[in-house]
Image (cartoon, grey):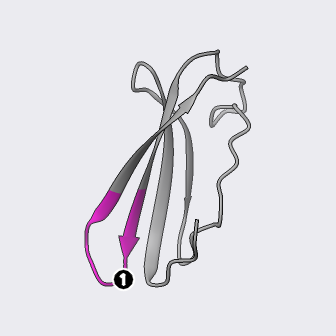
Amino acid sequence: MKDVSGISEYKLVVKDSADKTVKTFSGSSSLPSSFLWDGKDDSGIICKDGNYSASLAITTTIYSFALIVPTVLGFIL
């Protein structure tokens, strides 16, 4: 991802095929150039094989809403 100025916070949420959140990445001020998911959930347990999706919510310093960009991640092998 390109550096985006004016971001006050971001949240990347990884969900399984049942729409259950398994991993969350979040921060403020600076959006990382990339996200690396190791296939583990927030508790450090390896997720089962299957389809996962990710949504990135970005809140800017100019707007008070978040932009959601869904992405399909595919299988964990």
Residue 38 within the magenta-colored segment of the rendering: no
Which residues, given as a range, are shown in magenta? 57-67
Residue found farthest to the top: 49
Residue 67 falls in which quadrant of the image?
bottom left
The residue at 52%/28% (across/down) is 52
Q: Which of 45 and 2 is in front in this view?
A: 2
Residue 59 within the magenta-colored segment of the rendering: yes
Q: Position of residue 14 (x, y in %)?
A: 52, 38
Mark 1 Cα shell of 10 Å, populated few (<14), some (14-19), many (≥20): few
Q: Nearer the viewer, residue 43 or 11?
A: 11
Q: Which amino acid does label 1 sit on?
A: Thr
Residue tagged 1: 61
Describe residue 40's horizontal placement relative to residue 4 as left or right. right
The residue at 57%/77% (across/down) is 3
Which quarter shows the N terminus? bottom right
Which quarter shows the C terminus? top right
The residue at 45%/77% (across/down) is 7
Residue 49 position (above or below residue 5): above
Numbered marks: total = 1
Q: Where is residue 75 in the image (x, y as percent from the top left)?
A: 62, 22
Residue 40 falls in which quadrant of the image?
top right
The residue at 57%/70% (across/down) is 31
Q: Where is residue 34 in the image (x, y as percent from the top left)?
A: 65, 59
Residue 3 position (above or below residue 15): below
